[in-house]
Amino acid sequence: MNMKNRIGAFALAALAGAALAACNGTAPGGNLNPSNPTAPPEGAQYVQVELLSRPAVKEAFESFASHDTTNRTEPYNDPTLQAQIGSFTLNFRSQANASALQSILYPNEMVADLSQATTSASYLGVETGGATGSKFGGRGLSDDVIAISLGALFGNTLSALGVIPDDHKEIPCLTNDNVSYDKQNGSTFPYIQAPL
């Protein structure tokens, strides 16, 4: 199975799992529709309670008091996240760094360019023009998204990619969480190995 099919299968399975987990057999409007168990009950309304497309974005940049607002808001219409990415970054980095991070990390949604002829996903690939591995974007199972995010915030990732000039205000001890991915991905769903 090629990567596109894996991503598609993974996405469909994740959506199905999320739908079933959210419903847990029932929904605010009543039981699942017995004639079509995958359809929501007529008149059912669901409430978004979490938004976490890009790990570490809310956690690093946003005040905890704002998390609930962000969790319940569409990723492209968040009233707090973009501004807080900028204000947090300006505490120790240049305006160029803050503006670049705002444009790359907002909206807080995973972007994949399905027109790309590649079998490799690459975290922030679309936003960086392929500088992180490929222009497909998305997120590969072995992408170290925390290290990539910390490198962009505290390191020289953005200047090394040519996105902005180096402000020489890096904080090297914060550029990596030092947690390695030491497992092999499988060839069948869910593709990742059991926890160590």
Image: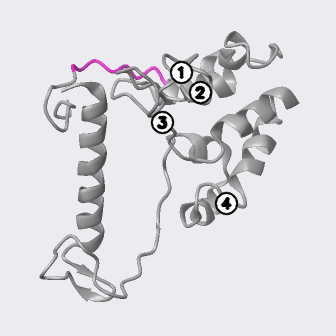
Mark 2–mark 1 CB contact (< 8 Å): yes
Q: Look at the numbered disc 4 and give the secondary structure of its residue.
A: loop
Mark closer to the chain start, 4 or 3: 4
Measured in 3D between alpha carbons, the distance from the residue under mark 3 to the one under mark 2, in whole angstroms, is: 21 Å
Mark closer to the chain start, 1 or 4: 4
Residue sitting at 30 percent across and 68 percent down?
22
* Amino acid type of the residue that numbered disc 4 sits on in the rendered structure: Asn
Mark 1–mark 4 CB contact (< 8 Å): no
Residue receiving disc 3: 112
Residue 140 x, y percent position in the rendering: 37, 28
* Amino acid type of the residue that numbered disc 2 sits on in the rendered structure: Leu
Name the quadrant of the N terminus. top left
Q: Is the residue marked by circle 2 packed among few (<14), some (14-19), or many (20+) residues within 10 Å?
A: many
Residue 94 visible in the picture: no
| Residue 82 vertical placement versus 155 (above, below) | below
Residue receiving disc 4: 77
Q: Look at the numbered disc 2 and give the secondary structure of its residue.
A: helix
Is 35 a magenta residue? no
